[in-house]
Structure formats: C-alpha cells, structure tokens
Image: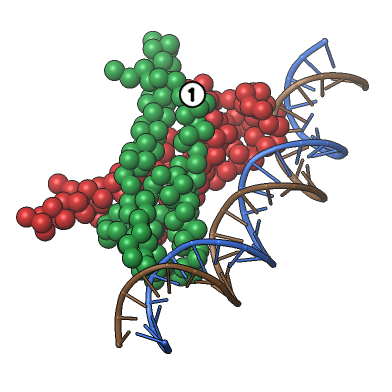
Chain colours: A green, B red, C blue, D brown
Amino acid sequence: MSRADAISPARLKDAAPLFAALGDATRLGLLVSLCSGGPLSVTRLSSKFAVSRQAITKHLDVLSEAGLVRSSRQGRERIWEFEPKRLEDAHQYLERLSRQWDDALDRLKAFVE
Amino acid sequence: MSRADAISPARLKDAAPLFAALGDATRLGLLVSLCSGGPLSVTRLSSKFAVSRQAITKHLDVLSEAGLVRSSRQGRERIWEFEPKRLEDAHQYLERLSRQWDDALDRLKAFVE
DNA sequence: AAAATATGCAACCAAGGGGTTGCGCGACTA
DNA sequence: TAGTCGCGCAACCCCTTGGTTGCATATTTT
C-alpha cells in the first residue's frame, strides 16, 4: 500500500491548465449546469449568468481547451455537454498529492520510532 | 446512495480561488516539494525552480491565501509547510461534481426505462 | 421573402498575474 | 564590529484574462 509514484514535472504541466480552467466561479457554474442539467445551447446557458453571451462562449472555449466539455452543432445551435474524463484526471492528481503527503508522514513516523 | 446535494453558488465562490491557486505549474511544484520534502525555507525552495526568490514568495503567498500552505518565522528564515485540509476541500468538491453527473445519468436511465 | 433567432468574429479596454530588478533591514557568523 | 545571509517591500513590465460592444452570417419561422 501507499508509497506513491513521484509526480513528474511533465504531469505538473498537464495538470496546471486543467486546474486553471476550474479556477473561475463562472466556469464552475457552467460545469454544474451541464453536469446536472444535461446538454445545453450557448444562449440557454447564458441566460443563467449575469454576463454576456460572448463572455460565456469564451469560458466554454476555455473549458473545451481543458477537455472538460465538448460541443456539437445542431442546426443553428451549438450544444455543449459535460466531459467527465478530464475531471477524473484532476481527481486522480489531487489523490496523488495527498498520498505523497501521507507517505511523508509515514516516513517521519518510522524515523521517530 | 448518491442523490447529491445541489452545489450552491456560495460554494462555487469558495472553490474557484482554491482551484485557481492550483492552476499554475510552479505552484503545483511547490506543493509537491512541501508535500514530500517537508517544511522548507523560501530560498531553499527557490533553488529548485528556474525563477527568482521573489517570484517564489509571490507564489507562496497565493498558496497561503488559498489555505494550501502555512508559514512561520524561525530566526531569519521563514519556513513554509503544506496544509492538507484545503486540499481535501478541493477533493470533495470534485467528487460532488462527478456525483452530480452520475445522478443525472441515473435519472436519464430511469426515464428511458 | 421577411423577420427573428443563434451564433461567430473582431476590436477594444481595464485589471490582474507572473516575472524582474533594486534596495533596505533584521539576524546570524567570523 | 564587519560581513554575510534570508527576507520583505516597491516599482516596473509585458502578456493574459474576463469583460464589453458592434456587426456579419447562417438557420428557422411566419
């Protein structure tokens, strides 16, 4: 058990933009909407927030770039939907960190005894 | 099981700065260092990265503001250490999101049948 | 065909972020 | 007492970000 793999710099560079995408209240709100409300169009999403449609589009682009969301054209609408895979990545990354912390504590404990 | 609590806007506003703090490769690197390497001083941390000591100080301030790290004075040095509680918050937040997603899928499934 | 709707694209703007350099000051060390 | 070491503070810089408005374009709807 435990004894986590070291966190490589490459993995850091991968994880940072992912967390950065999550680091905005509006974007988190969008994720929540898409998560629990199913696929939605841009304007329908915009109506839930206090900023312009274009601003929402930019946020969706950021989320898309991070792989947290996916879009498809349907007639004159663009429909956005949640993409759970990348969220799992973020999850795993946090776990890796806290596991590393636990290991360090274990080592310290072993050293004291 | 499941049927997650709704994610309140208040919680969004709390989570966003936390993820934002994690959204930078250098800061993630600092966390990894403090996580597995134990408490360290600013200059000692700086030596591990390609940027100036002052830049590292700024990053540490951001992490501290987010509650991910804690500092204390020791002689002429300032020692920084990892603070696991907030990381747990981030972790829980992600779980809440994915649980909400799973619930939505369950509802859809139930509807189809 | 005309009107309405949904989106895309571009320009622009203010603020914040990540980085630097320079300097001053308190705290150890020789 | 000098010197060195570790930090903090402030000013400055450039680029990114989150936001806006205005207009063009494609797709329905009437």
Q: In the image, what residue occupies the spot 37% across and 51% down?
A: A70
Q: In the image, what residue occupies the spot 46% across and 36% down?
A: A15
Q: Amino acid at mark 1?
A: Ser
**In the image, A106: left or right of A21?**
left
Is any atom of residue A25 visible in this view?
no
Q: Position of residue A111 (x, y in %)?
A: 43, 11
The image shows residue A3, relative to residue A86, as above or below, that is above
The image shows residue B8, relative to residue A6, as above or below, that is below
Name of the residue lying farthest toward the left: B113
Quadrant of the image for the C terminus of chain B? bottom left
Kindly identify which chain the residue marked by label 1 belongs to: A
The image shows residue A93, relative to residue D26, as above or below, that is above
Query: Across the whole image, how many numbered discs are drawn on residues?
Result: 1
Q: Nearer the viewer, residue B61 or A110?
A: B61
Please tell me in which quadrant of the rendered image residue B75 appears.
top right
Q: Answer few, some or many: residues within 10 Å of disc 1's Cα (few below 14, many 20 plus, some between 14 and 19).
A: few
**In the image, A6: left or right of B26?**
left
Please tell me in which quadrant of the rendered image residue C22 appears.
top right
- Could you tell me which secondary element the residue under label 1 belongs to? loop
Q: Position of residue A2 (x, y in %)?
A: 33, 19
**In the image, A13: left or right of C14?**
left
Please tell me in which quadrant of the rendered image residue B71 appears.
top right
Is any atom of residue B86 visible in this view?
yes
Q: In the image, what residue occupies the spot 52% across and 33% down?
A: A13
Q: Position of residue B67 (x, y in %)?
A: 49, 42
Q: In the image, what residue occupies the spot 44% across and 50% down?
A: A63
Q: Position of residue B29 (x, y in %)?
A: 54, 30
Q: Nearer the viewer, residue C19 or A43?
A: A43
* Residue under numbered circle 1: A8
Q: Nearer the viewer, residue B85 or C17?
A: C17
